[in-house]
Image (tube, helix red, strand yellow):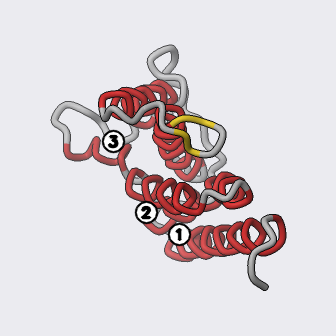
Amino acid sequence: MFRPGHYGVSLVLYAPVGCWLLVLGEPTAALAGGAALLWLAMLPDWDSRLPFVSHRGPTHTLPFGALVAGAGWVAATASGFGSAPIGPIDLRTFAAGIGGLAVLAHLAADLLTPMGVALLWPATGRRYTVSLCRADNRLANAALFALGVFAAASATYLGVVLFAGGPT
C-alpha cells in the first residue's frame, strides 16, 4: 500500500488502544501513542533506502516487528523514564507496544496486495497475501485512510463521551 493506506490501517488498529487510554483518563498518552504510531507507520519501507536490502524483505517481517518493539523498550529504558506509568502500564511497555503495532499495521496493509509479505522470514520465504488490491490502487488507499479516520474519530467519541463520561 501507499502512505495513505498505511496510515489508515495504523489508525484502525490503534483505535481500540486509544479508546482504552481515553477511558482510563489518559488523553495525553492516547494522543502521543497515535502520533508515534503514525510517525512509525512507514518505517518498514525504509528498506528502499538501504543498499542490499530488497523491498518487502527483512523489514516486512514479524522478527522486524519484534526488533522495533525491543528498540522501543530499550529507548524508553535509556531515557530514564522507563518505569513512568502510562495508565496501567509503564513507558517501556507502551513504547514497545507502539513500535510493534506500527510494524504489524504496516504488514497488515501490505498483506492486502498481491505481492504480500514474507511474515516468517528467515524461517521461510513464503509470502502471505490476501491479494485484495494493488498497492498503487488510489481508491483502496483512500478508502483505508477514510476507514482509519472514521475508526479514530469513533474511538475518540466512545472513549471520551460514552465511556469516560466526558462532555456531550
Q: Is residue 109 visible?
A: yes
Discs 2, 1 touching: Cβ within 8 Å: yes
Q: Secondary structure at mark 3?
A: loop
Could you say which disc has been placed on residue 2 in the image?
2
Residue shown at 64% from the left, 68% from the top = 152
Estimate the spatial distance between the alpha carbons at disc 2 and disc 3, rounded to whole Å. Answer: 13 Å
Q: Residue at x 66, y 74 (%)?
A: 153
Percent of width and height locating residue 105:
55, 48
Q: Which mark is residue 141?
A: 1
Coordinates of residue 19 in the picture (x, y in percent): 70, 60
Place of residue 120 in the rendered image (x, y in percent of width and height, measured from the top left): 54, 23
Q: Which residue is mark 3?
A: 55
Question: Is 65 left, or right, of 113 in this rendering?
Answer: left
Q: Is residue 40 above or below residue 157?
A: above
Which residue type does callout 2 highlight?
Phe
The amino acid type, in three-letter code, at marker 1 is Asn
